[in-house]
Amino acid sequence: MKNRFSALLIGYTILLAPDLYAQDTLKNQMMTLPQAFKLALKNSVQLSISKTETNLAQQQVEITKLEQLPGISTGLDYGYISNADIWTPSFSEHETGIIPHHLTEFTTEAAEEIFKGGEVRNNIKKATLEEQITILALEKNTEDIKFLVASQYLDIYRFINLRQVYANNVRLAKNQLKNILIMERQGMVTENDVLRTKLTLSDLELSIRKTNNNIAILNNQMNVILGLPADAKLIPDSTILNTNTSSNNVESFVDTAFKENHELKISATKVKIAETNLKLLGSDRYPSFSLFAGNSLQRPFLYNIPVIDVYYNIWQAGISVHYNISSIYQSPRKIKAGKIQLDESRQSDVLEKQNQEVDVRVHQLALLTDLIDATNTKIDAETKVTNAEINKVYAYFLLLKASSGSIGI
């Protein structure tokens, strides 16, 4: 029985092995930055909202285009008509006109606007520009999410590397403490030296715990962004350091920003929307012309005394002209407000260009500063390593001299 249970347990474990391995690789997962980008873009709620807004704007364009088509309506009325009370002009005599009480009317009407100061055309243009803004916003959100992932990814790498540095120093500090304890027993160092070494070791261990907390926080944030389980641990790919950071001159970056930056494209599109809106406001000053056609089947015939209880059919067609007289005093104020809005949009566009140029120049300067700092740090580290090697040889010679009186050369 025991052997059978053992066999079943082994078999069950073998069946679960792929899942267990998958969970282990999920909790400690080596992931390249492009893979992280792909996951973030796939699982981003913000991008899902942006895509919905884009779809809505596209649908709004299609709805606006329908304004070019004629409007068609139909109706059916059925009801009760009372008798007619009839008076002479002086209201001195009265009589009742008998009217068939059943009213039936079926109507069909079609109308198409042929001119309204370009309102339909500009409405379509405005809706199309608003659609472009949602597309640009989607592209901008995509790049923002990728930048957020990249910054989190590099921070995790930075802290993992820092933890390794601390761990190496902990091992060195422990070896140093071991040697100092031996030297204390031999009376070569004081208790203060021991306490100082223990304090250094304690500080390093505390730094490791803080670094582990920072890594855990960043991992939790990345798991939310990437749509991974809460206990997944991302291990950055070290080849990220091979990224080519060589760059062109700052002016080329400024030119690229003016052509490709999403914020600037959105700002420029808002200027076009303000210009189109100004044209729409001006369209109120023009009369509107429409073609119409209709057909009506009605009972009874009311335009006769006595009323005749018959079905009669009439159709009509023509052109309709409407003019909003109030636009004479309303349009100038609306147009003035539209011009102010256009001026504001143009100023915002100029300001956005200035901000982008400043950002590019600041980031370029930061990149150059970081490169200089990295070079200086590398030089300093190489100097320290060389000095340490020299000091080691010097200490060795000193030990030889102290022990034998000869350095052996």
Image (cartoon, helix red, strand yellow):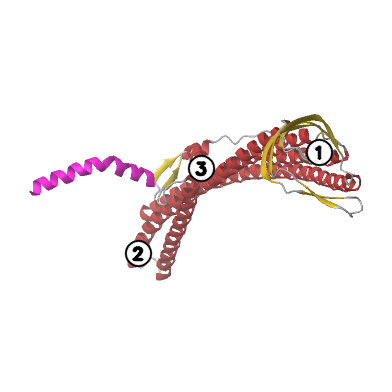
Q: Residue at x 81, y 38 (%)?
A: 304
Q: How many residues crowd around disc 3 within 10 Å: few (fewer than 14), some, or many (20 or more)?
A: many
Residue 29 % position (x, y): 40, 43
Q: Is residue 369 left or right of residue 188?
A: right
Q: How many residues crowd around disc 2 within 10 Å: few (fewer than 14), some, or many (20 or more)?
A: some
Identify the main secondary structure in magenta.
helix
Q: Residue at x 20, y 43 (%)?
A: 12
One can see residue 37 in this view: yes
Nearer mark to the viewer, of 1 and 2: 1
Q: Quadrant of the C terminus?
A: top left
- Which residue corresponds to mark 1? 304
Which mark, residue 181? 2
- Mark 3 vs 1, N-terminal side: 3
Residue 32 % position (x, y): 47, 38
Tell me where the magenta segment starts and ends, as one range.
Answer: 1-27
Residue 234 % position (x, y): 44, 46
One can see residue 381 in this view: no
- Which residue corresponds to mark 3? 40
Marks 3 and 2, how far apart at CA: 52 Å
Q: How many residues crowd around disc 1 within 10 Å: few (fewer than 14), some, or many (20 or more)?
A: few
Q: Is residue 13 left or right of residue 108?
A: left
Name which residue type carries label 2.
Answer: Leu
Magenta-colored stretch includes residue 20: yes
- Mark 3 vs 2, N-terminal side: 3
Toward the left, the furthest residue is 1
Decide which of 389, 42 is in the foreground and name it: 42
Count of picture labels: 3
Name which residue type carries label 3.
Answer: Ala
| SS type, badge 3 | helix
